[in-house]
Amino acid sequence: MATNRARRVLGYLESGKNLAGSACGVAGLGLTLAGVAGAYWPVVIAGLYGAGALIAPPERVAPPPFDPSEEVGALRADFTRLREYLGEVELPATAAARWAGLLELYGALLEPGWVAQVLATEPEAVHALSRAIRRDVPECVDTYNRTRWWNRLTPGGESPERHLERQLDLLYEEAESVTADLREAEARRQQTHTAYLEERGRS
């Protein structure tokens, strides 16, 4: 407790508020020595110190450093668990090609290396991929298996397989859109460098 109090006191002594207040207090002392403050010099010095402390800007607390690559690494680990989960559940053979294409695209985006580094710089792409891997794909599989069980009891209606295939098509389209956005980001980077070199050549 005493150590924390001492740290707070030391922190205030080193703060911008104390430095600004002290500077104004010194100015008040100068006025006192010049005979301007008169008998009220303690009030003048204290008032100027307080005014200086009030007008000083607040101390800026630096935000904690976040490493975007850590989120991509965590997402890669979750993708590995997702693949293990998919290997344990029963899925229709008619959707095998769709599953393979979707998982291949996810895996390519999360493969360690420069592609994953590019992905880490695009928060919206990471969010879309995270939502698909951590929520959408498991929900697709779970609802398919549940609905299929109910259909065995009361046949009829649209088949669960058809819904699953449509869901996978939509997820693949979304993954393709994410990939296209990343490609565009790299293309803009290349174009920016070209413009920079052209401008440098003219200077």
Image (cartoon, rainbow, N blue to C red):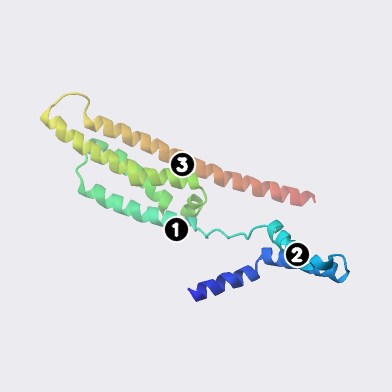
Q: Say which residue label 2 marks.
A: 43
Q: Earlier in the sequence, mark 2 or mark 3?
A: 2
Amino acid type at image mark 2: Val
Amino acid type at image mark 1: Glu
Could you tell me which residue is drawn at 43 percent across and 39 percent down?
A: 176
Evaluate whether residue 92 shows in this view. no
As helix, strand or loop, the secondary structure at mark 3 comes to helix
- Of 94 and 63, which appears nearest the observer? 63
Q: CA distance from mark 3 to mark 1?
A: 19 Å
Expressed as whole percent of the image width and height from the top left, the position of residue 150 reads 15, 32
Evaluate whether residue 140 shows in this view. yes
As helix, strand or loop, the secondary structure at mark 2 comes to helix
Could you tell me which residue is drawn at 24 percent across and 35 percent down?
A: 94
- Of 46 and 55, which appears nearest the observer? 46
Amino acid type at image mark 3: Val
Could you tell me which residue is drawn at 30 percent across and 53 percent down?
A: 81
Q: CA distance from mark 2 to mark 3?
A: 66 Å
Could you tell me which residue is drawn at 22 percent across and 25 percent down?
A: 158
Q: Say which residue label 3 marks.
A: 178
Disc 2 crowd rating (10 Å Cα; few below 14, some 14-19, many 20+) is few
Residue 70's tag is 1
Q: Earlier in the sequence, mark 3 or mark 1?
A: 1
Expressed as whole percent of the image width and height from the top left, the position of residue 135 reads 33, 43
Disc 1 crowd rating (10 Å Cα; few below 14, some 14-19, many 20+) is few
- Of 132 and 50, which appears nearest the observer? 50
